[in-house]
Amino acid sequence: MLSLKLLLGTVLLAATRVCLARFSGSAMEGMETAENIQREQIERLRSFLGPQVSSDSGYTARSTSKIESPITFANPRAKEFFVDGTSIPDVNFDAGPSWSGLMPISGHPNETRKLFFWFWPTNNISNVRDLLFWTNGGPGCSSLEGFLQENGPISWSWGQSEPTPNPFSWTNLSNVLWVEQPVGTGFSQGTPSISNDDELAAQVAGFLEQFLEVFGELKGSNFWVSGESYAGFYVPYIANYLYEHPNRDLHLKGIWIADPSLTWGLVQQEIPALRFAQANKNVFPFNSSFWAQLQNISDSCGYTDYLDEVTYPPKGLLPLPAGATFNETTRAVGVKPECRIHSPIQRAVGVINPVFDVYRVTDTFPNLWSVLGFPRSTQQFVYFNRTDVQDVIHAPHINWEDCSGPVYINPATGGPGNDQSVASTLSVLPNVIEKSERVAIIHGLADFILVAEGTRIAIQNMTWNGKQGFHSPIEPESFLVDNMGVFGNMHTERGLTFVEFYYSGHMTPQFVPWAAFQTIAYVLGKRDSPSA
Ligand SMILES: *[C@@H]1O[C@H](CO)[C@@H](O)[C@H](O)[C@H]1NC(C)=O
Ligand SMILES: *[C@@H]1O[C@H](CO)[C@@H](O)[C@H](O)[C@H]1NC(C)=O
Ligand SMILES: *[C@@H]1O[C@H](CO)[C@@H](O)[C@H](O)[C@H]1NC(C)=O
Ligand SMILES: *[C@@H]1O[C@H](CO)[C@@H](O)[C@H](O)[C@H]1NC(C)=O
Ligand SMILES: *[C@@H]1O[C@H](CO)[C@@H](O)[C@H](O)[C@H]1NC(C)=O
Ligand SMILES: *[C@@H]1O[C@H](CO)[C@@H](O)[C@H](O)[C@H]1NC(C)=O
Ligand SMILES: *[C@@H]1O[C@H](CO)[C@@H](O)[C@H](O)[C@H]1NC(C)=O
Ligand SMILES: *[C@@H]1O[C@H](CO)[C@@H](O)[C@H](O)[C@H]1NC(C)=O
């Protein structure tokens, strides 16, 4: 992202220079000023790309000096997992030492189910007692996406021509463990055997026990669980399981979840969809007859005034709108076909903006390529599908895809199935907040696959620490980023912090790494407030 912006900026400046040569004089003074401001801005941008970037021709030759790990492992088995940070394909800088490979989910000698992990030590010795677990969502999406495009020490994000060091890597704050889970995801091995997230959590707990046998120096760590999207199910269930079945070698302290699935799609997609499109009209530029059709659906399905009834404190449990269906057998809440409004909006905007991205609504033509082939396909290689990459990180030679599956089985038939778990705000999340020191829920305001205002509804309908919802309103302009100023809204009450980020789509550490960094630093206890 950043390096593409830099590139575009350079092209723009070159073009502007040609114009200025032809039209010098006071008439063009405004353009000249704009050009200078842009030049200053691009200068500032360089600092976001990290220390190793040279100003013009990219990286110099690969460094021979080796970064030392603040932690070493005595168990000889650890050596099998070691990754030399100067030998990672296409990474033209010393990324430092790390450990990766497959780890079984139990100590059973014939265990066939193994999760792929990549462990990176912190670059700051003061954080060496801290261990942060990261998982992407899906279900079935790889945590290596988070590693390479969101919060890892190496960034190869959308549109970047080559990997760069990530100055906002979460390894600045803690040891970090990226895990491809559950079984059926990424490089992980074995046949999926779970049908809910208690079972998922039990497998993660088994994996962690095996991991700590090899990496024994990490026993006794403070521990946090983090993730995004469908990890709104995974992370609270993993934390809940660990609180109910404590691992004496890990001291769980809290969780961080961003743009999470917290409740029914009706709540996080349908109810807030129209208001979201109206508030972002310049990227949802519909014609008036289509707006009228949408308004009609919204009015007749009970969405239009719904958000005004979500108060601080709430007046009581929040009712389901007229558009809801309820299945007496499964107790699942769905949407009446004529009350679907999110998909019609997404389909219509995709016609007038051919590269509309439901994960970040501000994207416009052209399409940014992704070295992971997600969310867009790409003409280039998929990084983790390359055998040279797989060899260096001790991964099996298999067809790797960013999102794969199925990862759940149908308990009745044993065939592919869906997650049978009840969403976390209606089940385990209250217990996790009550047992944690700090819990953060984050939401990007430019995300449309799950909408921030829907997350507010989910929070206001949840009861934790003896009360329902936040009792004071989420103050606008209350979240500030260091050196940037107001960057969104936040609120903390009874152990739960909610933060909304400007400029961010679904993958918050990818799109606004500075903002995500501050909030994870807060959860890890490295700062007193997420806000500057
Ligand atoms: C492991 O598998 C082998 C061969 O398949 C079998 O002989 C052995 O009994 C199994 N061990 C256990 C503990 O199940
Ligand atoms: C290392 O971490 C400590 C504790 O969080 C912090 O005070 C210090 O500023 C960090 N050092 C660097 C170089 O970031
Ligand atoms: C993270 O650590 C690197 C290396 O010490 C440093 O250059 C960078 O500024 C740090 N980032 C933040 C956000 O503190
Ligand atoms: C609104 O919906 C009603 C029935 O659902 C329909 O008769 C009417 O034509 C619709 N109006 C618009 C503007 O789509
Ligand atoms: C709010 O929570 C109650 C109790 O858990 C549930 O019955 C109701 O459907 C929820 N409302 C929404 C909008 O999710
Ligand atoms: C309720 O869910 C069950 C199980 O998925 C399904 O078989 C049944 O048709 C559903 N009932 C209705 C009224 O949709
Ligand atoms: C108005 O927008 C709708 C939805 O995008 C589209 O189906 C319809 O053709 C549009 N009408 C005109 C006149 O462009
Ligand atoms: C992954 O690599 C295999 C060959 O090693 C190839 O057949 C497959 O198409 C690749 N998949 C993607 C998504 O690039």
Image: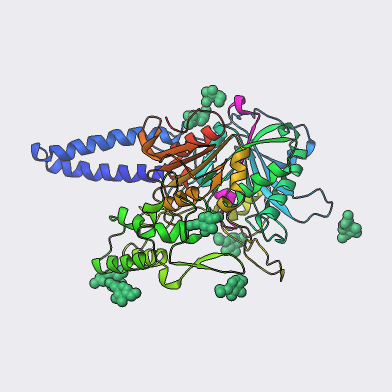
> What residue is at 61 percent from the left and 37 percent from the top?
436
Quadrant hosting residue 223: top right
Residue farthest to the front, as pictured: 315
Residue farthest to the left, as pictured: 26
> Along the line of sight, which residue is nearer the eye, 387 or 217?
217
> What residue is at 66 percent from the left and 45 percent from the top?
240
Magenta stretch encompasses residue 131: yes
Q: Is residue 374 above or below residue 124?
A: below
Is residue 259 visible to the viewer in this orientation of the structure?
no
> What residue is at 11 percent from the left and 38 percent from the top?
24
In x, y percent, where is residue 151? 52, 41
> Along the line of sight, which residue is nearer the eye, 92 or 331?
331
Please state the extent of the stretch shown in magenta in the rendering. 124-147
Is residue 8 visible to the viewer in this orientation of the structure?
yes
Figure quarter occupied by ligand 8: bottom right
In x, y percent, where is residue 44? 35, 32
Q: Is residue 55 above or below residue 290?
A: above
> What residue is at 41 percent from the left and 38 percent from the top?
57
> Along the line of sight, which residue is nearer the eye, 331 or 188?
331
Left or right of 375? Residue 211 is: right
